[in-house]
Image (spheres, grey):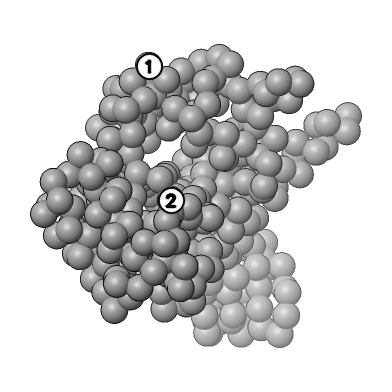
């Protein structure tokens, strides 16, 4: 089921800057979608358009069939937002902040308190719930911001650098929560980040954006197939028959290019049948970083021509 639909969405700011150029995407229930690109690529503009903060210059978008520009209040009830710099009330305690925002989302006081306490436990903030927000560290504020965004059980969760300022243990806890929200509760997570290695660990699908244009979208395997149709296979062996077209790249190390993993057993069989010993077999997969830099390098070459 599609939860977010974007069709030829564009935004031009006063002064003529094109921040977003005909973006088209669809997101499904329960997926963790990584929207990836450097600062200024158009990630924040996209989220502001999807949440009704900005009006598009062209195209359309909706959340669960609701247009955020026509029905902003309804769209807000369907979505939760966590920004890199959480804005809440420093003079209130963590619990008081959650009760306040729960009321703003239409929850009864009792329900809001129960929901707040549950989220504080999950995000390991129970001991700090009665402390003023002004005493919270950056990481604690970030976790409280996530709790606030989840109070009303949104269908779509927008996250901007969700582990920014967190220590490794807290970051792991937040990442596990993101996985559970998607897998167990069916929440669609729209995660904006410029950290490609982090995104590869946590996301199930990706959209790569640069200068307001979508470069590519898909799962890691789909992106690999598009950008790097062949894969590097490295075998450590006593020797490899010359007819198999391997290139020697080190002591007892040989490498070749294949198009499908299914080719590996046949290559291994031929080496063994030739009387050689195999010590290890490694398929070298391209990373999300490799894919992104290959795509952006291609665009730079096109612009230079």
Residue 39 in view in this figure: yes
Viewer-proximal residue among 252 and 36: 36
Q: Mark 2: few, some, or many residues within 10 Å (few <14, many ≥20)?
A: many
- Name the residue nearer the viewer: 20 or 140: 140
The quarter in which the N terminus is drawn is top left
Q: Residue furthest right?
A: 305
Image x and y of residue 237, in percent: 59, 81
Q: Residue at x 20, y 39 (%)?
A: 106
Quadrant of image for the C terminus: top right
Residue at figure coordinates x 33%, y 57% from the top left: 97
Q: Position of residue 245 (x, y in %)?
A: 67, 61
When asked about the image quadrant of residue 81, the answer is: top left
**Viewer-side residue, 253 vs 122:** 122
Residue that extends furthest to the left in the rendered view of this protein = 110
| Residue receiving disc 1 | 70
**Near-viewer residue (31 or 302):** 31
Separation of disc 1 and disc 2 at Cα? 23 Å
The tag earlier along the polypeptide, 1 or 2, is 1
Q: Is residue 165 above or below residue 187?
A: below
Say above or below: 68 vs 293.
above
Q: In the displayed structure, does residue 95 sit left or right of residue 134?
A: left
Image coordinates of residue 207 in percent, x first then y, are 52, 41
Question: Is residue 161 found left or right of 89 in the rendered image?
Answer: right
Give the label on residue 216, or none: none
Residue 178 appears in the picture as rendered: no
Residue 177, image quadrant: bottom left
Q: Residue at x 47, y 41 (%)?
A: 218
Circle 1 crowding by C-alpha within 10 Å: few under 14, some 14–19, many from 20:
few
Determine whether, in the image, residue 149 is placed left or right of residue 163: left
Instruction: Tell me the number on the disc at residue 82.
Output: 2
The residue tagged with tag 1: helix, strand or loop?
loop
């Amino acid at each position: 089921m599609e939860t977010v639909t974007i069709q030829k969405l564009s935004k031009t700011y006063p002064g003529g800057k094109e921040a977003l150029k005909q973006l088209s995407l669809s997101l499904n229930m329960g997926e963790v979608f990584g929207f990836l690109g450097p600062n200024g690529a158009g990630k924040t503009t996209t989220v502001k358009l999807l949440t009704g903060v900005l009006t598009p210059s062209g195209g359309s978008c909706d959340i669960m069939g609701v247009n955020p520009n026509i029905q902003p209040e309804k769209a807000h009830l369907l979505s939760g937002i966590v920004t890199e710099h959480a804005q809440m009330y420093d003079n209130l305690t963590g619990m008081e902040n959650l009760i306040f925002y729960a009321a703003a989302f239409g929850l009864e006081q009792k329900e809001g308190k129960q929901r707040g306490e549950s989220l504080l436990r999950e995000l390991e903030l129970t001991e700090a719930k009665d402390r003023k927000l002004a005493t919270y560290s950056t990481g604690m504020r970030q976790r409280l911001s996530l709790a606030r965004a989840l109070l009303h059980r949104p269908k779509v969760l927008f996250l901007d650098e969700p582990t920014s300022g967190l220590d490794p243990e807290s970051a792991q806890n937040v990442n596990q929560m993101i996985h559970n929200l998607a897998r167990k509760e069916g929440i669609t997570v729209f995660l904006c980040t410029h950290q490609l290695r982090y995104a590869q660990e946590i996301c199930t699908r990706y959209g790569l954006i640069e200068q307001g244009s979508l470069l590519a979208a898909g799962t890691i395997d789909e992106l690999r197939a598009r950008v790097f149709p062949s894969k590097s296979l490295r075998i450590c062996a006593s020797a490899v028959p010359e007819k198999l077209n391997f290139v020697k790249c080190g002591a007892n190390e040989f490498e070749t290019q294949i198009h499908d993993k299914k080719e590996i057993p046949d290559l291994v069989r031929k080496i063994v049948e030739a009387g050689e010993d195999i010590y290890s077999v490694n398929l070298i997969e391209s990373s999300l970083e490799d894919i992104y830099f290959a795509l952006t390098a291609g665009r730079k070459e096109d612009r230079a021509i």
